[in-house]
Image (tube, grey):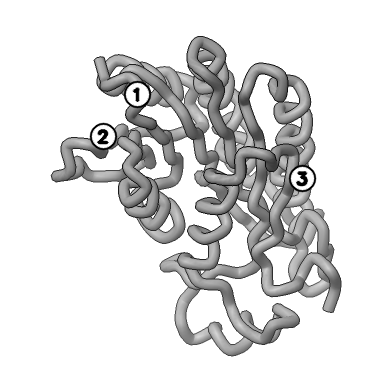
Amino acid sequence: MGIPGRKVAIITGASQGIGAGLVDDYRKLGHRVVATSRTIPPSGDPDVLTVQGDIADPATAERIAATATERFGRIDTLINNAGLFIGKPFTEYSREDYEAMIGVNLTGFFRITQLAVEQMLRQDGGHVVQISTSLVDYASSTEPSVLASLTKGGLQSATKSLAIEYAARGIRSNAVSLGIIRTPMHPGEYDEELARRHPLGRMGEVEDVLEAVRYLETASFVTAVTLHVDGGRAAGH
């Protein structure tokens, strides 16, 4: 059982890129962390526990929540960072594409968030953050993304519903809507073209995302917000 009052964060999709950055950032904030992804290796930090598994499988969510409560005693923050993006013209999506994106982006959010909120209700509140995409708000004929809009748009709506349902119980819910962030997902040879898709003329960096999540973590009067970290994309181009 963990130390009461020592905050604990769960971070999904935590093996690389934004997720790995979030793990490091929450450790700097003094949180213990339960980090999960399909292939995440064990951590040498005793205050970081890793759980391997597919977040689309509800059994993975059960193991993550059990790890957090059994080893650390509480759950204070859940960051639903795991996400899958498949960009295709709408009529070219396969059933496999649909099921994969629904599985990670929606099913993956659903069970782990239920379990985290149940634990937060037994405590003194908590904070849930969804990582979304500016394509929900800024549709582009050059970036077909119906399944991203369907799934991540659903998460942005759920963010508001969670915030209002649990506001009186001390649980906040927010989202961060991203532009294109420089991570291992994006080969470097396309950086110049990807930068031009943002009014600010550059790609985002992982640190830009960390700053936004850090703000939401400490902004105790902020809930039901989708914070755009997208170089202006959501406003148009």
Compare marks 3 and 1 and give the one earlier in the sequence. 1
Residue hosting label 2: 49
Q: Residue at x 76, y 71 (%)?
A: 233
Q: Residue at x 29, y 44 (%)?
A: 40
Q: Is residue 237 left or right of residue 226?
A: right
Relative to 167, say whether 141 is above or below. below
Distance (Cα) linking label 3 and label 1: 28 Å
Figure quadrant of the C terminus: bottom right
Q: What amino acid type is highlighted by mark number 2?
A: Leu
Residue neighbourhood size for the residue with mark 1, other residues' Cα within 10 Å, grouped as few (<14), some (14–19), many (≥20): many
Picture coordinates of residue 125, whole percent (x, y): 55, 22
Compare marks 3 and 2 and give the one earlier in the sequence. 2
Residue sitting farthest toward the top: 122
Element class at badge 3: helix
Residue hosting label 1: 68
Distance (Cα) linking label 2 and label 1: 8 Å
Q: Residue at x 63, y 46 (%)?
A: 97
The front one of 208 and 181 is 208
Residue 68 image-quadrant placement: top left
Residue 190 image-quadrant placement: bottom right
Q: Is residue 195 left or right of residue 17?
A: right
Figure quadrant of the N terminus: top left
Residue neighbourhood size for the residue with mark 2, other residues' Cα within 10 Å, grouped as few (<14), some (14–19), many (≥20): many
Q: Is residue 195 left or right of residue 90?
A: left
Q: What amino acid type is highlighted by mark number 1?
A: Ala
Residue hosting label 3: 153
The front one of 6 and 166 is 6
Picture coordinates of residue 38, whole percent (x, y): 36, 41
Distance (Cα) linking label 3 and label 2: 30 Å
